[in-house]
Image (cartoon, rainbow, N blue to C red):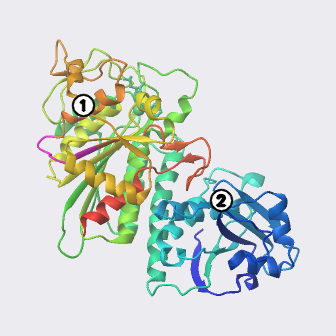
Amino acid sequence: MSIKITARSTDKPHEIAVDLLVVGVWAPSSPAKKSAKGALATLDAAMGGALSKVLEREEFAGKAEQQVAVHTAGRIAASKIVVLGLGSKDASDAAHLRTFAARAGRAANAERATSAVIVLPEGFESKLRPLAEGVELGAYRFTRHFTGDRKPKAELAEVVFASEHKFAADAKKQIEQGQGVGRGVNMARDLSNEPPNVIFPKSIADLATHEGKKHGFKVTVFDDKEIEKRGMLLLHAVGRGSSHGPRLVHMSYVPSGKAKKRLVFVGKGITFDSGGLSIKPAQGMGEMKHDMSGAANMVGLMVAVAAVKPDVEVHAIMACAENMPDGNAYRPGDIWGSLDGKTVEIINTDAEGRLVLADALTYAAGLEPDLLVDNATLTGACVVALGMTWSAFYVTNEDTRAKFASALKESGEQMWHMPLVDEYKDQLKSDCADLKHTGERWGGSITAGLFLREFIGKTKNWVHCDIAGPSAADRPSGWNVKGATGHGVLTFLSLIERSAK
Ligand code: BES
Ligand code: MN
Ligand code: ZN
């Protein structure tokens, strides 16, 4: 179901009949102070002083991690109030606003609310897009496979942004775009959360085709035979061990006016990574259903692009295969050709991501992009380096780094710049082929990036994102809920929108 979000100028948010009223409060806050002004004071008065009493008892000071819920017992029109700490006032960028709205969305789910008023702190009324994104992202749940009692009975259906100030003339458009973007990210989350018996190369290709028809972008799919015929032999090799053949999916959006730039994105789409013959340990193997998060991001990105309609040509490519052990599976010791022409000696079949990406990058380079960006749940080494909530990005030049960094500043996503250390290239020398596909254990995320760089052809501006850590979360934080996050989509979108300027 979808959420209806509206904006309403009012100084009486407590008169709106909803299940839940959410109000944000900056730190430091002392709720008991009689001189207190603003929304909190208005609410407290309507509550006959009961709100400040509870806040005082809970030692609420407006800190960013603080959250207090209060039953209203009929004293105001809403059934419940949730007060969210906003932290200190200097932090109020898009990420902060998105997080605030997402916390409201998560609170609404926790309170089984179908309707909510979010009382906006002063200044927030002019930034409705990140707020609308946040509502969609925070209220997200993956419930498709629950039945009976496990199926949530209440779903958030209506949200009112309330402010005592006037909203901008384009408030409605901002909300629409924000919801469109949020739905794009949620699309990526859905695909990544789906189990590997539901999402495999053909089914994700079919879903992309379906979304393309719905949102008006073009989708071309190469099947197993076409992949082999075109010489994408690395992608083909990885797919050999599975009864589900590989797919290369090319989605494209062309603006109605003249395109200012052409941006091409590539995502790793390993719909399940068992490791292949170099099989992974049983413990945690199920998490490898998320190994297509990079590809899922591509569909999510296209859905978001369709919502914001930038003056930029956008291509998103998914390299999809299932990495399985089988009599026909590719083996350590094999040598395979590639679309680029280089031959590759296989060392470990669990380093499959860089192989499918290599062919997809060469294909993408053929589109002559102004900027080429890939994203992949590529290495455990990257998770060791940066932990679960930061991803790494690598670039071919300083100008591209600066562009990507400003997109990151806007999106608020946590990505850290890492170096493509040329010195380590020696590790990819093979005795019997042009390249071997893995290096030493140390610096494993860097050598994976160096391997990929061999396949970008004449492309000057390239960004590689290793999203192995934050593609899925083990707990809610920021605008994420537990499970798939869609990490990357917001930054890529910001990059696209900046290129349109
Ligand atoms: N999909 C994994 C990387 C991964 C690890 C993603 C943890 C998310 C969480 C990738 O295909 C892989 O198995 N990489 C190997 C490479 C190694 C064999 C060189 C790894 O990181 O261990
Ligand atoms: Mn692997
Ligand atoms: Zn993998």
Q: Is residue 120 left or right of residue 190?
A: right
The residue at which mark 1 appears reads as 450
Residue closest to the eye, 314 or 222: 314
Q: Which quadrant, please, contains the N terminus?
A: bottom right
Q: Is residue 29 magenta?
A: no
**What is the crowding at mark 1: few (fewer than 14 residues within 10 Å), some, or many (at least 20)?**
many
Reply above or below: 377 against 440: below
Q: Position of residue 41 (x, y in %)?
A: 75, 77
Q: Amino acid at mark 2?
A: Arg
Q: Is residue 111 left or right of residue 99?
A: right
| Res 42 label | none
The residue at which mark 2 appears reads as 106
Main secondary structure along the magenta-highlighted residues: loop
Q: Secondary structure at mark 1?
A: helix
Kindly identify the residue that appears in the image at 38 percent across and 34 percent down: 378
Measure the alpha-carbon separation of dots 1 and 2: 40 Å
